[in-house]
Image (cartoon, rainbow, N blue to C red):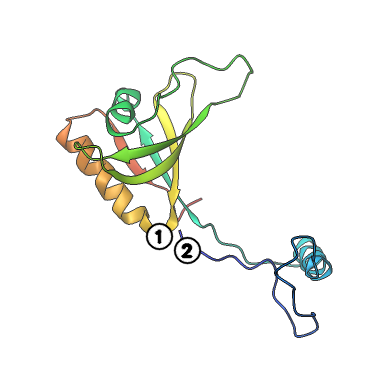
Amino acid sequence: SGIETPICYDDGSMEVHNSSKVTDFVWADKAAEEAKHVLEHVGLSYSSFSKILVKGTGSREFLEHVTTAIVPKKQSKIPGDMPCRLTYATTPKGYVCTEFTLCRENDEGTSWYLVGSRDHHHMDVTWLRDQARNANADVVIEDMSTEI
């Protein structure tokens, strides 16, 4: 997606990393210092993913209609385990619009948590709402990206 996330922030004391060596982790000590600081003080974080809820009695059928996923119908045999699937949202002609990780939120299969691209979440939410309206689906689409 082109989103870059720094491993750590250099204060100028680090050696230049030899990017040709996969095992040359000169940043490990600096990353450990930062982790310790965050645990003991404060840190800043952001999510590089969108978070969308699709809820309603027709949510499973709706997601099967607008994505390529075989949406999990059965409850997991492990209590509390909710299955997830990587899926693609496609146009009626089969072109890929976006991708989501789709996670079942409840045993009834009436609430689904979708994780997608942070940079496209407005487009994704609008597209999902348009598809729900066009299909007259009994679903509510909630953009949770700024709340979670």
Pinpoint residue 58: horizontal percent, then vertical percent: 29, 24
Q: In the image, is residue 11 above or below residue 140? A: below
Measure the C-alpha gap from mark 1 to mark 2.
10 Å
Q: In the image, is residue 46 above or below residue 82? A: below
The residue singled out by tag 1 in the image is: 119
Q: Is residue 36 left or right of residue 10?
A: right
Residue at the outermost front position? 20
Q: In the image, is residue 23 above or below residue 16? A: above
Amino acid marked by disc 2? Gly
N-terminal of the two: label 1 or label 2?
Answer: 2
Residue occupying the point 42% across, 32% down: 112
- Look at discs 1 and 2 and give the one toward the viewer: 2
Amino acid marked by disc 1? Asp
**Label 2 element class:** loop
Q: Quarter-wise, where is residue 76 in the image?
A: top right
Residue occupying the point 52% across, 16% down: 75
Cβ atoms under marks 1 and 2 closer than 8 Å: yes
Characterize the local packing of mark 1: few (<14), some (14-19) or many (20 or more) Cα atoms within 10 angstroms. Answer: some
- Viewer-proximal residue, 101 or 139? 101
